[in-house]
Image (cartoon, rainbow, N blue to C red):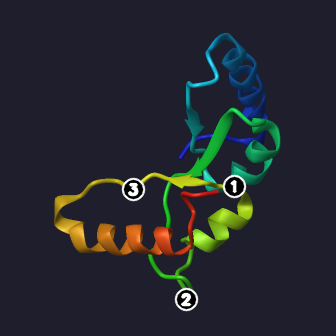
Amino acid sequence: MNGLKSSLSETDKVVSALADYPDTADCLICPPSTLIVPMKDRAGDRLKVGAQSCHPEKFGAFTGDLSAEQLRDAGASYVIVEPDIAADQAVHRLARRQIAEDIFNR
């Protein structure tokens, strides 16, 4: 994960550059979890904000992990699901949790 509060000005540049593209172009940015809220505040309507990861369980003591519910509450409407052949069941559980929390359909 990369990015600090000082890099949020890059978001403003992206939002400004989107004016040069048709409204049909989708643009998504997935910052570190510490920047989701301030990035969402700057993103406007055209730039969507997502998360880099999501824990498959809704509740629990999973230090450092965020649930789909927490990510949605922070303003994320997408999440990156990294493919890993050895972890197909975990990816499947994660996708089910995200769908259950309706994180994709905001």
Residue 83 versus residue 55 in the image, above or below: above
Q: Secondary structure at mark 1?
A: helix
Quick check: 5 left or right of 29? right
Q: Which residue is mark 1?
A: 34
Q: Which residue is mark 3?
A: 81
Q: Residue at x 56, y 87 (%)?
A: 61
Quick check: 6 left or right of 76? right
Q: Could you tell which of marks 2 and 1 lies nearer the N-terminus?
A: 1
Could you classify mark 3 by the number of other residues whose Cα lies within 10 Å: few (under 14), some (14-19), or many (20 or more)?
A: some
Q: Which residue is mark 2?
A: 60
Give me the C-alpha separation between circle 2 and circle 1: 20 Å
- Which residue type does callout 3 highlight? Val
Q: Could you tell which of marks 1 and 3 lies nearer the N-terminus?
A: 1
Could you classify mark 2 by the number of other residues whose Cα lies within 10 Å: few (under 14), some (14-19), or many (20 or more)?
A: few
Q: Residue at x 69, y 32 (%)?
A: 46
- Which residue type does callout 2 highlight? Gly
The residue sitting at the left extreme is 86
Q: Secondary structure at mark 2?
A: loop
C-beta proximity under 8 Å, tags 1 and 3: no
Could you classify mark 1 by the number of other residues whose Cα lies within 10 Å: few (under 14), some (14-19), or many (20 or more)?
A: few
Given residues 6 and 50, the one toward you in this image is 50
Quick check: 66 left or right of 15? left
C-beta proximity under 8 Å, tags 3 and 2: no
Number of the front mark, 1 or 3: 3
Query: From where the camera sits, is residue 30 visible?
Result: yes
- x, y percent for residue 96: 40, 73
